Image: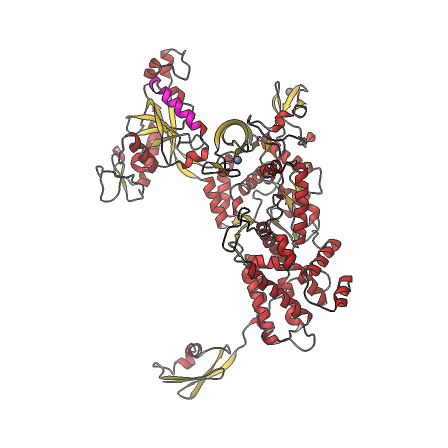
Amino acid sequence: MTELNHQIAAEGSDAYDPAVVERKWQTRWDERGTNHTDLKDGVRPFYALMMFPYPSAEGLHVGNLFAFTGNDIYGRFQRLQGHTVFEPMGFDAFGIHSENFALKVGTHPAVLIPRNIENFRRQLKRAGLMIDWRHELSTTDPAYYKWTQWVFLELFKRGLAYKKPGAVNWCPVDKTVLANEQVISGHCERCGALVEQRFLEQWFFRITDYAGRLLEHLDWLDWSESTKTAQRNWLGRSEGAELVFRVQDLLEIAGAATVGFNAMRTTAEMSAQTLEIKVFTTRADTVFGATYLVLAPEHPLVDAITTDDQRTEVEAYRDRAARQDIVTRKVNKEKTGVFTGSYAINPATGQPIPIWIADYVLMEYGTGAIMAVPGHDDRDFEFATTYGLPIVRVVANEGENAHTPLREPLLDTEDPARLVNSGRFDGLTVSEAKHAIVSWLSDHHGGKTVINYRLHDWCISRQRYWGPPIPIIYCEKCGTVPVPENQLPVELPYVEDFKPDDTGVSPLARVESWYKVKCPKCGGEARRETDVSDTFLDSAWYFLRYPSTDFPQVPFDKARTEKWLPVNSYIGGNEHAVLHLLYARFVTMVLHEAGHLDFEEPFTKFRAHGHIIREGAKMSKTKGNVVIPDTYIERWGADTFRTYLMFLGPYEEGGDFRDQSIAGVRRFLDRLWSSTVEARRDGAPDPQVLRKLHQTIEKVTEDIPRLSYNTAVAAMMEYINALRQGEREGHVEEVRALVQLVSPFAPHIAEELWERLGGAGSVFDAGWPTFDPALAAEELVTLAVQVNGKTRGTIQVAPEIDQDGALSAAMAEPVIAKFVTTTPKRVIFVKGRLLNIVV
Ligand SMILES: [Zn+2]
Ligand SMILES: [Zn+2]
């Protein structure tokens, strides 16, 4: 007997006290290394990954715990099925969240973060997760980010990291670049400030080169459909055509004005020069209806084609557009624009059409230019109406013709709609015309079929302090020089004043002693890159590091990686569907190509969990309705809290947290406790109860792998009701398997009860109860069937079957049915014994 058991026995009371039980087992797990994974020799390895948290000062959020508990149950279940399960944990501690909070409270993040991590670790341990803490990592640890920098260099070496001036969303309050998805209707997601557009030299990763593969693999990945759909939309593949529009009257423009390109050229040279505007369209079939072109205000040809008359207006418009953020430009309802004064030739009609600029066209998408077809596009229709540009119908539905007026754009032009006003292509269906027109244009005027993606290259520069420095050195002689691998990590220096300022350069650019270095190539004076990398780079590879945290010399050990990766099961929130999950896939593909990994996809299986609300409302700090896990765990115990979280609703949908309902789950564990400690050991278990038990084993065994945790808990509750019906005393063989079934949900109480039932070692090493279909089968009774009082046969039915059920079972037997040739006049049914059909 352990000391605690003595204590419990000495106190005389043997009621369930989660505080005592949970402390006892957490201590014991630590002492015995119960949660340690044998990464080297463990059989049937199973890597159960959860999304590592950002260690906020507020501590573990209930949403974190909801996610982690769901993963923990899955992991523990796999262990009970005979797998060696690895459930690691780490901290995503770099980034703007931490830095802003540090600025707010006036404490350096280097001081704050370890404190927060300490608190998180305490809370995670208290929650009873099966974490192997020996493999904990933090992205802020130089031993970790040394390899984040290595990942950067791997991309750099392969030409996948490059620098260019980029139009970026700039938050004037946070003084940083924001990703498009961090801009919510023109405002900063973090602070609410109106976002501006700036041009900064930024490092980008060429993720767009991988768009096709990132999309194709989704077809075979075992992921939540909602996540795959989000990624497909984000990648935004569209098949279309690139068409070429020649700018007209170049000589005339050149003669009339000083144009943006070389004004010193002779007229003869000018005439030889042809300006071409390429547009991307998914609707090449409507090219005869293109009545004007629109360029993005930043389009490189704008200067060259703008006429003198229009220059003042064009420049004023470009200035205004430059101050807007990118997202607002995408969603802006009001369409504005300016005529450049120039015309281009529509390659299909041969007619000149005006060239405009408008901020609804973005440089980042397609070619930064569109052909406007107001007859068949909402935006273009609106624009043409506003500026009095021609609207031409080129598609007609049934019952319409070339002259039917267009009061609104005709958008639904699926077959059998046919082309009109389109010369030789009149009469073709839309899908026929798409191919025919592109092939005709490509023969005569240039133009080709192309695949376009909505995905942009990944901007990874951050002009902030709290991140891994980008491992690049600039030398006047040698140019851009990667930091040699043996000089990694480039440590982030401790900087007292890390506040970003309006200059748009990183706070590290103020630390001369840090950025002034010798060039690794020539030894001359050089300067470090002072931007740090995006926190999404930290999390794009962390799952590779966990199994290898004990290998300081490599980012990930070859044998370990082969044994443990790809990740068997990854559980996390869909808010990371398009950033983290896409970036992790991209980085894995690159490392695979570089020969470092033998797989291309990091997560074999991914499931998105749902979210919980409280008493019908979204939880928020401002509303003050956030569930603080510590409070609940203290009052109810971790086992109750865990089980309750899983009972709230379908795990992949989430549920409503209600303070009143948690007591019901606690009652269930109380009854499990008393049923076990009071269980009879003599005599035999009740066959009815055993039947229910095996039905429950079957249900829970099917439910857990489907993450249907709420129904599994409901089934166990139902079972304990059956077990204790009429306050009967259970038999030890009726509770033993229940303790095992409950163990993934409520691990501490399960360990304690398992020990009390005489189990040796941890319940998690005791395997899973075997489902016996014979025991689970409903017992059948034999029913004699008579027709007009004469016995004609027997049927096997459930004891509870009713008259209708018995009758249809009897009629299914041909030997009986042949005597019943008309509708029965009367049926006499004696439950469990006799069925007499009177015809
Ligand atoms: Zn902001
Ligand atoms: Zn040099």
Q: Provide the major secondary structure of the magenta segment.
A: helix
* Residue 464 placement (x, y as % from top left): 59, 32
Residue at x 64% of width, y 58% of height: 635
* Residue 21 placement (x, y as % from top left): 70, 61
* Residue 758 placement (x, y as % from top left): 72, 67
Residue at x 60% of width, y 55% of height: 74
Furthest-bottom residue in view? 789
Q: Which of 526 and 788 is in front in this view?
A: 526
Residue at x 37% of width, y 16% of height: 272
| Above or below: residue 105 compared with residue 63 | above
Number of dots carrying numbers? 0
The magenta stretch spans residue 309: yes
| Above or below: residue 749 compared with residue 263 | below
Q: In which quarter of the image is residue 233?
A: top left
Left or right: residue 383 versus residue 71 is left
The C terminus sits in image quarter: bottom left
Left or right: residue 839 versus residue 138 is left
Left or right: residue 36 versus residue 168 is right
Say whether residue 556 is visible: no
The N terminus sits in image quarter: bottom right
Colouring mode (rainbow / by chain / secondary structure / one colour) = secondary structure
| Above or below: residue 738 compared with residue 223 | below
Image: magenta residue range? 308-321
Q: Nearer the viewer, residue 528 or 236?
A: 528
* Residue 194 placement (x, y as % from top left): 48, 34
Q: In which quarter of the image is residue 309?
A: top left
The magenta stretch spans residue 137: no
Say whether residue 135 is visible: yes
